[in-house]
Every structure is written in C-alpha cells, then in structure tokens.
Image (cartoon, coloured by chain):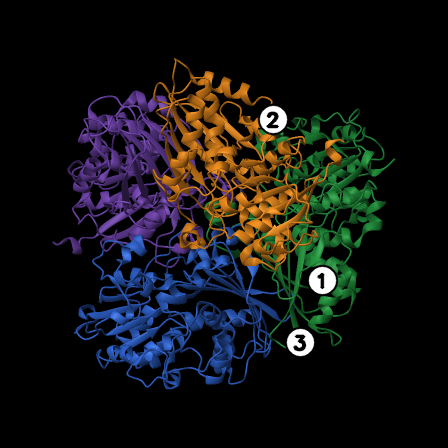
Chain colours: A blue, B purple, C orange, D green
C-alpha cells in the first residue's frame, strides 16, 4: 500500500488552545488524516468552529470533555496531546496502558485504556521532554507521575532523532524556544566549532507561545507597542535546551537563554552569540550548517548577508538560519527563525506523526509562508 | 484528459508587488500550474526570493523586465497582470493582439504579440473594470487606451459571472473593496429586499490593499496605533461598486463608500447599513443570502449572532457575511469580511483562472485560514 | 486666592484599571492636586508602581482596599470613582451620605460616611449616566440602588453642561463612545440641520476602552491583525447616546451605533452618517460646528479636506471633528476622534473636576498629543 | 533673574522628521522656550500642523526652507539641528562662523553667519559624535567637512558630561542606541566590575529610530507581525558606542552590538550580556548602578526581579535599568529601556539645552510616561 492511500485516524486532546487549533489547521490539509476526536474540557459540547471560527465548516467532530470520550470504537491510531503541562502525564499514562502514579481517577484511566493497543502519542506538552527525573522535579515542582514513560519518550527534534521517532510510541515534541535554539547549535557543537560554555541565546517571541490562557500580561494593551524580557535565567526551556546541548557534547552545558515578549502573533527569532572553538571561523560555521541541512526539507541556511526574519516563515514549517561574523574577534552571531505554532509546535508534531506512520515526512507540511 | 493532468503555463506580470507575491504563493500550491515567467521592471535580474524571501527556493524563474521577455517559446497559457493601474491597458492590448492607442512603443507590443494566439489574461488592475468609457476617463483622468478591450473584458466577480468568465480571454478581477461590498449587496438588491438608494458602506482595511509602493502614509509609524478615513466620497472603488449595483438593479445607483486604513497587514471588513425595501425584514435578508451562497465554496453566511472577523479568513479565499437587525426600525446591518490579498485579489484571480481553464473552481484554493 | 494656590486633596477609587492609571498620570501633572488615596481591592498593599511601573516613583500612597480606608483625617475634597459598573452606586451613596438600598454592608457605608460633608464625586462608571430608572433597569438588569442620586447626578459632557457641573456634587462622566458621538451630533441637532431619525454611528475603538479585566477576546492574539464588530445593536452606550440626543431634540431618538474593536491601545474614531434636515448643506454643518467650538479649548474642527486620525489626539484631551459631503445627495459624513482614556475618560473627568473646583478648565490638561 | 523668567528663542532645523516633531512637542511644554524658527526644505511653506496634525494650533511659525531663513532679526539663542547625517556639518559650520570645507554654497553660509554670535547648537545628527577624524571617514565614507568643530563638539550624554555641556556651543547628542547601551555600561566599566572585551549588546528598536524617510523596509506591511536583525556587526552606532566605552576604560574596546527592528513606534530595549571582572558579582553591579543613578532625575534602576519594559518609559525622558544574574557562572544580564524619540533624541537634546542655558535640568521634561 502506498503512503497516499494510508488512512490515519487522529484524536487531538486540548483542541481549544492555539497549538490544538494549529494541529487542526494542518491536519485538515493532510491527505492521509481523518480527525475523529477533539477534546476540550472547558468548551465541551461546542463545535470547534464556535471556539475557532476560522476552523468552521469541515465536518469536524464536536469538542468533548476528555472524561466523556468512549475510546472503543474510535479506532484511533494517533493521539496528539496539546494539553497543559502537568496534567498530560496522567493522561498519557492511561493512553499507553502504563502504570502511572496519577492524580487522574482510576475510572478515567480505565476508559482511556480501552483504546487500541498500538496507539501512538505525539505530545506537545513539556511533560516528557526532560530525561532526568530530578531535573523535572526541580523545574516543575513535583515528582513526575509517569516516570517509566518519561524515560521511554523520544525527544522529537525531528532532524536529529528520525530513527528513534519512527519506532516510538511516545514522542515528546520540543518546545518552541528549544527548537529555534537547537537547530543551529547542535550541528556546531557536534562539529566542535563553538565553545559550549559561552552560549548566549537572546530570543524574541510573539504571544501565541504563551497559549490562550487568561493572563493579564497577555492582554493586547499589555503587549502592544512594547517589548520586555521575562523568565530571565529561570525559564523552563532552560533545562530542555541544556539537556539537548549536553547530549550533543557529552558534557554538562549551562547556557544563557533570555526570552523577550513582543507584539506579534506568531514567530520566534533567536539571536545566538557564540565563541569559536578549535580555531574555527565564521565560514566554517556556515559551511557546517549548510552541509548539515542541505537535504533537509524544513531547515535552511540563508545566503550570506541575508538576515532571517520571522515574517518569512509565518504559517510554514520552515526554520531559517543565518550566520554572521561578530566585531569581537573569535565570536560569531547566529540568527534563527521559525513560526512557533508550526515548526515550534504543531508542524513539528505532524512531521513526527509522518515518521511514526511511515509516511513521507513532508506530507501535509508544504505550506508556503504567508507574507505580509 | 482529467483536470488533474492538465498543465497550465503561467506568467505573472508585476511579481514584485504584494498581489504578485500572493499569486506566486497560491500558484506554487496549485497542482496544474507551472510558473514560467515573472516580470518586475525595477527588480529585474533578481530572484523572487531576494525580493520576497518567503518565496525563496521553489525553482522559480528570475524576475525579468517586461521589455526583455522573449514570448515565443514560453508557450504561456495564462498571463496574470498585477501591474499598476494605467500602464496595464497598453500591455494587455499587446498581449491580446488588440489595437491599442497606446503609449507603449510599437516594438514592445510587437514582441508581446509573438505569444500564443489563445493566451488568456487575468487582470488584477482597475484598467478593465469599468464598462463606461466616460466613467473611466472621469475617474482616471485620461481616455482609455484600449477601449475595445475595455468593452470586451468580463468583470470577474466569480460568483456572479461564471459563464462569461469561462469563455472570456480577458477577465478584469474586482477590487478588494468592491468584492467585500458586492458579495452581500448584489443578492439583496436582486431580491428587491433593500433600498438601492440608501446604502452606506463603511470599510476598514489593512495596509496591503495599498500595495508596496513607497508612500509616507504607509510607513509603519504613520499607520501603527491609529485609524483614519481616507478617500472620503471620492475613492476610485466608488464607480466600480456603483456600476455593479446598477447592473443588479437596472437603475443608476449612488452609494456611500467610506474606507478606513488601520494597522493590520491583511483583511477588509465592511459594515454596510441598509434600509429594507418591499416590507422585507432582517430574517428575509439572512434567508436570501443563505440560499444564494449555500452551494458556494468560498462565500458563507455566519450563524445568527456571530460577528465575522477578518482574522477568521486570513490567508484564505473565503468571504464571510453576517446580518443583524438595526435599532432603527426598517434598517439592517451587514458585516462582510475577506482577505484583501486572497479573495480580494490573487485568490479570486486564481478562481477565475480555474474557470477559464475548465478546472474545478476550488483547485489550489482550499487553504484553511491562519489564526492567530 | 488665585486658582494657582488652591490645593485639592484627591482620592481615586479603582486605581488599578486603565482609567484609574490615566487619572494618576494626569493628576501628577496637575499643579493644584495632591493624590492622598488610591484604592484597588485586588491589588491592596501594593504600590501603584508595582501595578503600573510607568507610575513608579512619585511618592504616591499605597493601594488600599476600599473597606480599609480610614476616611476621617484624609480631608478629601474630590473622589474619582473608576470602579466597575454596578458596584459604584452603593459606594457613591455612602460617599454622599445618601440613602441607598445597597448591597454594601452598613458598616462600610458608615466608614465612608465619615468623610468631609462637602466631598464631590466625579464618577467614570456608567452608574449615574442614565436619567431614567426604567432604562437603567432594562439595560443593566437590575433596579438602580441609589435612585435619588441617579436623578441628582449631572451628565458630565463638559462642553454642554458647564454650569450644572460647577454646582454639582456628583458628576457622571460620559462613556468614551458617547463622548465621540455626541460632540459633533448635539450642535447639529440643536441647529436642526440633520434628521434625528437617520443617524448611523460606526465606531472603531482600541482595546483600553474595555479595561484591564481578563477576557479571552482581549488577549493580544485575539485582537492583533484583525477587526470585528461587537455589541451590534445592543451595546450599553446605545441608551446613553440616545438619552443625550433626545435631550437635544426634545423627542425620542433611536440611533444606529455599531462599535468595532481594532488592534490599537488608545483611540476611538466615529464615522457618523447623517441626512440633512431643513435644506441644510454640508457647509452649514461645518459652519455650525466651527462656530460652536471656536472658543472651546479641547474640541476642534479640522480644515476642509483633512481627515481626523486617532493618532493625532493620542494622550491629549482633544476631540477633532471633520465634515464631508456624501456621494448620496442629501447626506453628509462626520468623522470624530479622541483618546478614549483622556477625553473619553480620565481627561474629561479632570476637566469636570476643574469646573467643580472653580479652577481654569484647562489646568493640567494641556498635554500635546504623542505621535508617532 | 530666576530660571523661570528666562526666555530662550529657539530654532529647529529639520522640523518635518520625527525627532524634529518631538522637539516641538517637548518645547511647546517648556516654560522658558519660544520657538521662532522651523525649517523643513521639502515641506517649506506648510504649517507644521499640516505635516504633523498633532502639532496644529499652537501659533508656531510656518516651515521654511533653510536657504530662505533671514537670520538677522530672529535673535535665536539655541539652534536644534535635526537634519540628516552628512548635511549637518556644513550648516553647523555656517551657524558657528567656523571655517568649513563645505559643499554648501558661500551665500548660504553667509546668510547663516548673520545670526547672533553667541548662538549655541544642539545637534541630533551623527555628524559631531565621533572624535576621531579617521573613524568618521571610515564609517561615513568621506572626510569630515568641519573638522575643527568635530573636535570642539561635546558628546552630550548628559549624565556624564554636564560641565562640558554647560560651557559648550556645540553639543553632539548621542544616538538612541548608544544612549541605551552606555547608561548602564559606563559606570560598570568605571568601577572595573565587567570585562570590557566581552560585551554583547542585543538591542530591539521600534521604527521611529529610522526616521520618516521613505524606505520599503519601513512600510507597515514590512515591519508588522515580525522581527529581524539588521546592520549586524556594521551599524554606524558601533564606533560611537565603542568610542565612549574606550573613553571610560582608557583602552580600545570592541563590542558586539546587534540591533533588531520590531513592530512598535517608540522604544528601545537593550539586553546586554557581560562578564564579571575583578571578582565582582551581580549585587556589585546593581549596587554600582544604584549609587551612580541615585540622584539622577531621568535614569533609574528598577527593583530586583523587575524587568524593565519599553512601554513604561513611553513619551518620557526616562531610562530604566535592571540587573540580573546569568545562569552561566561569572556573567550577568543587564536590561535597559528608553523612548528613542525622547531620552534617545529630543528629550536628551532639551536636557542638554537646559544645561547650556543654565536652567534646571528637568525643565519641560517631567512628562509621566503614557501607558498603555
């Protein structure tokens, strides 16, 4: 059977958030996918078109409360979890018949457990990204409630874990900030061209990275016409970035990661300041990245002298990277951009689903960016 | 041969403007189209990816000056003209072997004339929208230079002229404001449910409707954090709207059309204030529009009580319409929205191309809107 | 004693909202005012500089819970109420020693009652704007709880009620939409130049008009890059506008008022569509407005052909009005703009305070607009 | 004679740009200033209220062409130059009777020379900021045309050059980026607490820093909903920042300065990454800055844990600084913000004028920031 004929039955948990809606948008254009379940506890009973009018009119199922789902009969192949951090781990434990030590009641897990035994989970939350149980507990304030799954989960930075993803039943999709930071840094650390102990990542993000939750600092009037840094030196994406950089180098890496919130809906730009190692020069960095990403469909290095801009990847699964000489001798500047809701969330998740389902990786992901 | 196998060779004149870029974006996803020519006089010699980095990397032809095009050999089937108003008419005259009284030199027209004799032109400029030669001269300040073509051209409001478009070799695509105004008004006038002499169209537009030309009032700092009306009672879309409303009613219609410029990239919202005719009520208007657009793929009536928003059609070819009772007895309020670069320009143009080429009308146009 | 030496002791109730913060901004620059009390129940104990960092560092009092205020000893002359609609009426009843039928407990009212017997209240809520008890109950869903004060309060559209305001102890400041609508309409109705039964007010507002409360539709991502209408034909400013227009004409007026929410922080623009009465022409309307506002410090008519823009009044107490001929015979278009937080709220409130305190009306209100 | 009675006659050259308009806004509120001359070559003959409607109605002089100014009789005390870089040096040479080697014709310089012999010039351009003639020539592409004045000019970073400014006749006001970078860095370098050879300045700016000139990349549609870096490692503010840091340390300093353009009108935020020197810790840095700025009216250090935001200084002459520990040992993060048109341009210029004129430094500069 060719990839084109394969039918994949998909459920999306947490379809009333921005990442959930973006999954719906992308999957509606995916030739192999049928969306058979959408959950959203607080909007249960509504059509997704009421919650997100841009998604009206595609014959989608109504939003359900997770506890009302009758899993048997849905024949779901893939579950996307776009749920808040913390609550995800119990639910995924149920989905995967794993032994949790959960807060979710037995009955609910029992219901979940009635689904197909070979279901795969693509998780967009932070719950399964960190390998180390202690690090998780330190940054999230409680012990992990599904530790065996935490260990089992594959960190889904697609370009670096294709084989593991293909054979995984639980993919933990990277955060938006880690994605934009890791894509340029991992190959350079692999090549030994930059000093792992002098990495400064100054990131600028639009608002959708923070989700649709009601917070005063996300009101239009609080974000419009301004910029500020937040989570300085204690953002939860710190340990995630450091874990992956440490994996790349084999030593413990601490980085500077300083996110800023700015008035745009979509997009992240990271300006990363690095120091050369092993007598590398800016051309070497560029060369490494160009070779590493030459055959990648979604990651590209822009021509010399061009500065990547978030608006040039809006709505697409692309990540663009530029490399620049610094005025300070021995240093370079790397600029990387992506759309936080696509390559930084739903797009990378679909890319991982394609791998898990043995489909061509680009299926349903070839949107040309929307500009202006 | 099925529609799916058909190959259409397309040229885009004026590919360095926003409408031209949007044509490229849409046509890159069109399964039957091959883009074989892109012109842009001031950017000639550059790749479209230099001018519009979001369009880099698709194997597109380089931008050429129009006068450098060697038409023979290109085997072009469809030419999209996204050129400034005024200059279009000479060029189209050449393209269609028509007798112009043009300002373009003979040589250039001669070159153009060497293209296929059955080429079709989809024009996005205002040059061929007005039927009446005097009206054109009055509003554009000079006599039309290709008057026979002005008469021949079909006004391409797709939902109302399908048959004429299918057999036309010159389609004049409506302006963005006329499209958003006419889609709700024409069926209501057809039904005799509103007074044609008391129509007030208050429109709010993003900036891309004005194109990429350098004007002080289009600088970010001049548009951001504010709104103003412009072209009050003398916008060039006035006669275009009035022509089509007059065509619908058979009498001369004068309307109020008041456009406003606001800080967003894409989108138009028209709030139209109408008075009932023939004892109609708000339910009748809703009913007329719902029936008229029930089978239309790109025009829809939102549920009662829902207010259409531009952000719910962004990047898509959709037009959404809502109908509301007024507090003033005998009056109603209609709200319609679309993306000015898609349904208001490039999308409607592709929709017309599909008709001209006997393809399914929705081909390449089923993008789900991008929100947020 | 000259105005310049007068000291006014001011309290602001509800200082953690946008209108409250704008009162603080303006009063910090007012030469006669000392701010001696700031209340904000949910932020009690914080400094206003924590809640609004732009107001840090002026020696202001800490925010208190209203119920913790010890009124005796504060010697307050003027209380500004920037509290939510509905809760204001009980508190003002207490402040003014009036008999309420309130929900606030006796004790609290008792505490409030211990303040100076000649305190004056400038209210920014909607609680005292409507004269008619039934209209209030109909639009706000409950009977008014301080009906004698409702009758006593002066509607504080400064330019039309100076003498009443000067001698009032309770001024109900108009809403932002009513202010921008009434300033052009009242003189024209007074002059009998427009038909009172054919008035359409299409208003476009920034987000701060909705306050700082947490609502999903006020998140940046829900407002950015888009526009929509809301409250169509049932906005609570409808009866307020109609009350004042009816007062001007002596007959019951119903108007169309359609507000739109757009992505900017400050500013309202109203485009008002009117029909001439008594053979008036556009020049007559312009003449009436120019003469009416010739000596007003804060309301102006822009030169012919100029379109007022919200950005030209940002941060100032100005309202600008333009008058334009319509293409439809017998009609005109009026555009008016103001900053909703200044002339539409805090600025007009200070203007009224100046009157109440027998100070020059412009004191502390001569900020030049901030552009861009 | 007290400061309050002093009258200063001011001319503004280049009043049709954003910095010029901001000078007008601030000086209209300055109690000692009378604006007697406004020049704007391309808008000559218009009233400033036509070019900037927010400045209409203050009895200001009409805009003149510089070459039409009749200097004698104007009795100007202070000339603000808000002219483009490059053209300023000839004009200032004329104003100050200096020997230029100019491109301006003799006649014009002659006319200029007829003004008061004790006129003082406050220059907002880059023409007189660099001390070194070679550095100027290298970065601006031509030898300076008024080299003696280049040497004579005082670099007007007010907080660091008060005494020189007071006795100067030519103050070169710092650029907006240098101001936001130098205010935190100079005291820390003075104190020897940071490594001068490892300074990374990541700056984010609104659009008005680029002025009102017509450039495609400043169109709303090119800036909205996005961010990008520009001038990476070759921005003309590089040598200016380096000159002042080198002055502070006595050795040649090279820094990383990476500016980004983002969608807001006003504001700059600099996130500066530094390495400790001499065993300093983050508390030491904070302490140094707090003590240095304890008595400064316009520069402040925010409380620990607070992140400065551009929106908290909008429209004001304030610069706010925050200091944060880095996760990388031995490093710190400094965030500084200001309004590029005020403290970064016109406000600092007025502050310098106050010094030059022996007025209290804060005169006319005590605007409370405008938020939201």
Label located before the other in sequence (1 or 3):
1
| Cα gap from disc 2 to disc 3, whole angstroms | 57 Å
> In the image, residue C152 lies at what x, y percent?
51, 33
* Residue A30 appears left or right of A252: left
Q: Residue at image x 31%, y 76%?
A: A121
Question: Which one is nearer the viewer's eye here, B310 or B25?
Answer: B310
Badge 2 element: loop
Q: Chain of mark 1?
A: D
Contact? badges 1 and 3 (CB < 8 Å): no
Question: Which one is nearer the viewer's eye here, B69 or B216?
Answer: B216
> In the image, residue B2 lies at what x, y percent?
13, 54
Residue A278: mark in rendering: none
Do we see residue B215 in this rendering?
A: no
| Cα gap from disc 1 to disc 2, whole angstroms | 43 Å
| Cα gap from disc 1 to disc 3, whole angstroms | 17 Å
| Circle 2 Cα neighbour tier, 10 Å, few/some/many (<14 / 14–19 / ≥20) | some
Where A174 falls versus B279 (above or below)? below
Where C356 falls versus C18 (above or below)? above
| Circle 3 Cα neighbour tier, 10 Å, few/some/many (<14 / 14–19 / ≥20) | some
> In the image, residue B236 lies at what x, y percent?
37, 29
Q: Quadrant of residue D19?
A: top right
Q: Chain of mark 3?
A: D
Which residue is labeled 1 in the image?
A: D185
Contact? badges 1 and 2 (CB < 8 Å): no
Which residue is labeled 3 in the image?
A: D330
Location of the C terminus of chain C (image quadrant): top right
Where B309 falls versus D289 (above or below)? above
Which residue is labeled 2 in the image?
A: D46
Q: Residue at image x 55%, y 27%?
A: C161
List the single residue furthest toward the top.
Answer: C279
Label located before the other in sequence (1 or 2):
2
Badge 3 element: loop
């Amino acid at each position: 059977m060719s990839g084109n004929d394969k039918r994949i039955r998909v459920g999306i948990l947490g379809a009333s958030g921005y990442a959930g809606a973006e999954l719906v948008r992308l999957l509606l254009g995916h030739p192999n996918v049928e969306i058979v379940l959408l959950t959203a506890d607080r909007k249960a009973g509504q059509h997704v078109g009421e919650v997100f009018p841009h998604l009206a009119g595609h014959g989608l199922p109504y939003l359900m409360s997770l506890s009302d789902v009758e899993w048997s009969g849905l024949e779901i192949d893939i579950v996307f979890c776009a749920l808040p951090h913390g609550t995800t781990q119990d639910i995924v434990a149920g989905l995967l018949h794993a032994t949790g030590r959960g807060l979710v009641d037995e009955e609910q897990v029992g219901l979940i457990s009635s689904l197909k035994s070979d279901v795969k989970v693509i998780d967009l939350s932070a719950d399964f990204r960190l390998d180390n149980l202690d690090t998780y507990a330190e940054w999230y304030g409680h012990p992990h409630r599904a530790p065996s799954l935490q260990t089992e989960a594959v960190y889904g930075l697609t370009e670096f874990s294709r084989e593991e993803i293909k054979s995984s039943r639980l993919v933990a999709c990277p955060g938006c900030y880690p994605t934009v930071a890791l894509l340029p840094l991992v190959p350079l650390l692999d090549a030994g061209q930059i000093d792992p102990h002098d990495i400064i990542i100054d990131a600028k993000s639009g608002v959708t990275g923070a989700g649709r939750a009601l917070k005063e600092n996300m009101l239009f009037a609080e974000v419009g016409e301004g910029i500020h840094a937040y989570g300085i030196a204690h953002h939860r994406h710190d340990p995630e970035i450091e874990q992956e950089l440490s994996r790349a180098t084999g030593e413990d890496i601490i980085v500077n990661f300083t996110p800023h919130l700015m008035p745009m809906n979509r997009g992240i730009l990271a300006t990363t300041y690095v120091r050369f190692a092993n007598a590398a020069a800016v051309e070497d960095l560029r060369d490494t990245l160009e070779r590493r990403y030459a055959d990648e469909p979604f990651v590209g290095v822009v021509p010399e002298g061009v500065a990547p801009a978030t608006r040039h990847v809006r709505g697409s699964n692309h990540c663009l990277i530029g490399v620049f000489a610094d005025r300070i001798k021995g240093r370079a500047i790397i600029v990387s951009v992506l759309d936080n809701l696509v390559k930084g969330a739903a797009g990378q998740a679909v890319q991982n689903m394609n791998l898990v389902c043995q489909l061509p990786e680009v299926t349903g992901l070839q949107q040309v960016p929307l500009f202006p």
